[in-house]
Image: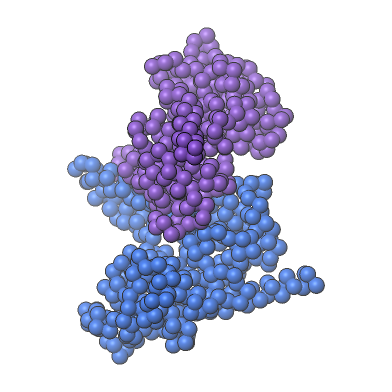
Chain colours: A purple, B blue
């Protein structure tokens, strides 16, 4: 295990230091090779460290930053006007090599814009994408893009396939992850010209291409990686969130109907709790900004400490596997393969 | 209550007459003003009627058709080569006025292509769309398009808004249904140029426009109608189906873990059953093909009798409210309003 130094945008997210510092404590307790740099307001963070019984000299230290990117800030404004924000400084630390990754629960648009500006995109990759892990009946699925690129050319979708495949290889330890392209019918006749072209491109690559998949394959775990544009990916992800909220609303209201159903709920409590654990989205918190010269992990804004810790864990896994270098090597191999084919 | 005569594509769907005839029986038992025409193979249907203790002379009669559209048939092939299919003949009966609506659990693409060809699109409407009802925390949502039109111009999306609004007005009895446009962020800055233009068009109409909604609004019931293109709508719908399957898989496996959890499941059984009833997709089976000069309802291919009955019920509601005429009046009013504004 190599030593892993990770910067946390400690001011980001709905709960700021109250969550990020508590998560930092979980991380140093559970992952011995981790060191953390908490970026943000010195005073707030020092107080929060004390609340969590954490020593500053140890594996957790504070790096002062005077500003905070708000959830409502436009990405361009955050980038231009808040050069000393906790988010920006954390990404700068990745850039200058003081840390190997950063984790933020802040404004997604600002995080992507700032990361692109500071770290730059890997040579050969047109656009970075956001990739997350979703639970499924047969196993996990890595899905990208989730909103960074609402409109994508076939070439960009093919790059996403390559990046998602490298991530799944690292995180799941699968040699040749299967890759599916999201479409509205598994027959080759359906879908737009652009989707068909993307399918051809991925099929010609060295990836383990499964073919088209549909929306219901996401939570089946049909493939290891699902590729789609940021518009469809985002709507699909949020549709899942909405349905999960509906199910949990119905469960709660039915078990609270009267004393008899409450009693039944009490009997079933251990089972209901283990169902909740298995479906808990917090276990899957932490989306990767793929395609950058550096590791940046986005946590859900409303994450609690356990959930933010999970995002830190993903950063550690990506450091262990040097995901950006893997992607860079894969795209170089891919491009030279294409060049050989042409010449 | 007006008399309602409905044709059933009795051969369509995964289970054919076994389901459609059983559903016909439920319909005549439960809805007194309904008469049904079962379209399909005379012999099969006569036998199935006998199995269900249904008399041919009564409110159910058979109309023979010699062919069947298969699930794998290409829409163009079904349209050109199977002119005596149960699907085609059922739609012909709508066209010639012998029935007021038809219901089919057959191949969606063939049903849409045949309906467009036979019934034609309402004057002023560019393309018919598929609209379904989804359950939500606060109430139902009518969502369209679900796959008929993978790519849509802003003008077409605005027509969908108008059609969905008229349907929700009829089915839910709401005077001014709220309409949302599916996007990847509720701020006006997000989304493509096309989405922004569609938003302007709907805002300028007389509809009760809510603005942008996101994927998680679908199952919240934020608005009465959600408009999107057929690609996004289809992926989103199927994502919901996939997640529902995952949840029910996890529920089942956790309650079957050991004798203790089985016992807990037994205690909670009545509650679990009422949860299942509330979330049962069969209760919402029956998608409307909107924008045609006639009422065509698509049932899920795997529907059982209860579920197919629900699609028949939706046909009855649309007859009661004369949804095609409502849409036709609404689009004429809309166009004359636009004309006035221009001149």
- Position in image of residue A144 (x %, y %): 48, 41
Q: Position of residue B14 (x, y in %)?
A: 31, 67
The residue at the far front in this view is: A343
Residue beneath the point at 35% across and 36% down:
A176
- The tally of labels here is 0
Taking depth in this image into account, of B335 and A334 the one nearest to the observer is: A334
Relative placement, left or right, of A114 versus A181 is: right
Residue A221 in the image, given as x and y percentages of width and height? 36, 44
Quarter of the image holding residue B28? Answer: bottom left
Residue positioned 49% across, 70% down in the render: B289
Residue at the extreme left = B259
Q: Is residue A153 above or below residue B162?
A: above
Frontmost residue, B83 versus B232: B83
Farthest-out residue, top: A57
Image coordinates of residue B26 in percent, x first then y, are 32, 76
User: Where does the N terminus of chain A fall, quadrant-wise?
Assistant: top left
The residue under the point 40% across, 67% down is B74
Q: Is residue A132 above or below residue A246?
A: above
Residue for point 57% across, 37% down: A126
Answer above or below: position of A229 versus B276: above
The front one of A322 and B35 is A322
Compared across the picture, whether B98 is left or right of A61 comes to left
Residue reaching furthest to the bottom? B57
Visible in this render: residue B65?
yes
Can residue A281 be seen? no
């Amino acid at each position: 295990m190599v030593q892993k130094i990770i910067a946390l945008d400690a001011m980001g997210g709905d709960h700021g230091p109250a969550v990020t510092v508590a998560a930092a404590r979980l991380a140093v307790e559970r992952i011995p090779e981790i060191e953390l740099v908490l970026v943000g307001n010195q005073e707030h963070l020092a107080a929060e460290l004390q609340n969590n019984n954490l020593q500053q000299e140890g594996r957790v230290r504070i790096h002062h930053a005077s500003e905070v990117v708000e959830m409502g800030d436009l990405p361009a404004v955050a980038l231009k006007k808040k050069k000393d924000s906790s988010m920006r400084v954390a990404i700068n630390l990745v850039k200058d090599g003081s840390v190997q990754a950063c984790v933020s629960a802040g404004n997604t648009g600002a995080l992507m814009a700032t990361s692109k500006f500071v770290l730059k995109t890997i040579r050969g990759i047109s656009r970075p994408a956001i990739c997350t892990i979703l639970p499924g009946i047969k196993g996990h699925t890595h899905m990208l893009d989730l909103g960074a690129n609402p409109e994508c050319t076939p070439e960009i979708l093919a790059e996403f396939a390559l990046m998602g495949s490298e991530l799944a290889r690292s995180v799941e330890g699968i040699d040749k992850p299967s890759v599916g392209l999201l479409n509205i019918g598994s027959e080759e006749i359906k879908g737009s010209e652009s989707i068909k072209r993307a399918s051809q491109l991925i099929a010609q690559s060295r990836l383990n291409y499964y073919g088209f998949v549909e929306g219901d394959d996401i939570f089946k775990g049909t493939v290891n990686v699902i590729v789609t544009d940021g518009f469809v990916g985002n709507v699909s992800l949020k549709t899942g969130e909405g349905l999960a909220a509906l199910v949990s609303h119905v469960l709660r209201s039915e078990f609270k109907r009267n004393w008899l159903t409450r009693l039944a709920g009490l009997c079933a409590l251990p089972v209901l709790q283990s169902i909740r654990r298995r479906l808990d989205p917090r276990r899957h918190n932490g989306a990767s900004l793929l395609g950058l010269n550096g590791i940046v992990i986005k946590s859900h804004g409303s994450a609690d400490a356990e959930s933010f810790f999970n995002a830190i864990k993903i950063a550690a896994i990506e450091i262990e596997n040097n995901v950006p270098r893997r992607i860079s090597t894969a795209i170089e191999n891919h491009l030279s393969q294409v060049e050989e084919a042409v010449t």
